[in-house]
Image (cartoon, rainbow, N blue to C red):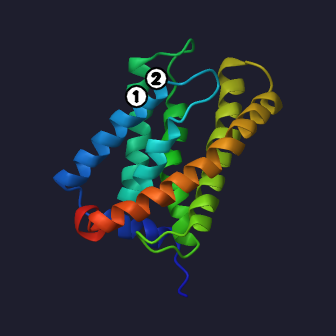
């Protein structure tokens, strides 16, 4: 098994052109992300799901773009009680990029991702973004609560979301590969 570096993963993704089909799918994932984000109930939100699956289907750079654009569009559609801050858009963008990069670093080959590699990618991505960065930025920018309290709440939510995301993404990728030529359509 050949070790792949982060640079090689990004370079390979950069070499893939942004076709009309890929840009259309990116727009669909942004729209889904905004829609799902506006439908959240209390602290439960599955707004990260369309962002994460866009990274797995389209690649880490499109996943990064989908995440950032989704956060900005979602703020426009449903503003929070706090002012907009680009740091949260960055965490959303990383949400679309980190899981697929981690899965690829673990040796996964597009589009044949194993459930374990999808799970580990999402676990690392969500812990870094939702459990670490968002609480730190929230306390740093707005002084609300404590970092530990916000991290505990985020970790509780992610304990449910991460395995659900991993299983659903694995099922969808397996189903999509039966009807879509991934290499031709997305890469």
Residue 178's x, y, as percent?
33, 67
What residue is shown at x 41% (from left), y 69% (from top)?
A: 111
Residue 6's x, y, as percent?
52, 68
What residue is shown at x 35% (from left), y 42% (from top)?
A: 29
Which quadrant would residue 67 be assigned to in this image? top left
| Pointer 1 with pointer 2, Cβ within 8 A | yes
For residue 55, above or below residue 154: below
* Of the pair 118 and 2, the residue shown nearer to us: 118
* Element at label 1: helix
Q: Which residue occupies the extreme bottom position in the image?
A: 1
Q: Which residue is mark 2?
A: 38
Instruction: Give me the disc on residue 97.
Output: none
Question: Is 148 on the left-hand or right-hand side of 90?
Answer: right
Q: Which residue occupies the extreme left position in the image?
A: 20
Residue 10's x, y, as percent?
43, 65
* Of the pair 85 and 155, the residue shown nearer to us: 155
What residue is shown at x 64% (from left), y 61% (from top)?
A: 120
In 3D space, how far apart are the residues under numbered discs 1 and 2 (Cα atoms)? 5 Å
Question: Is 163 on the left-hand or right-hand side of 76?
Answer: right
Instruction: Give me the disc on residue 35.
Output: 1
For residue 114, above or below residue 163: below
């Amino acid at each position: 098994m050949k070790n792949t570096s982060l640079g090689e993963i990004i370079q390979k993704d950069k070499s893939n052109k942004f076709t009309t089909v890929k840009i259309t799918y990116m727009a669909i994932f942004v729209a889904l992300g905004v829609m799902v984000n506006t439908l959240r109930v209390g602290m439960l939100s599955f707004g990260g799901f369309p962002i994460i699956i866009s990274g797995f289907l389209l690649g880490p750079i499109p996943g990064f773009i989908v995440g950032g654009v989704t956060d900005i569009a979602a703020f426009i559609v449903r503003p929070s009680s706090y002012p907009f801050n680009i740091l949260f858009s960055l965490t959303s963008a990383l949400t679309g990029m980190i899981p697929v990069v981690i899965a690829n670093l673990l040796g996964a080959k597009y589009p044949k991702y194993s459930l374990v590699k999808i799970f580990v990618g999402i676990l690392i991505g969500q812990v870094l973004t939702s459990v670490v960065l968002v609480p730190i930025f929230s306390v740093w920018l707005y002084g609300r609560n404590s970092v530990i309290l916000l991290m505990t709440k985020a970790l509780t939510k992610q304990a449910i979301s991460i395995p659900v995301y991993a299983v659903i993404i694995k099922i969808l990728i397996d189903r999509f590969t039966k009807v879509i030529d991934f290499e031709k359509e997305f890469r």
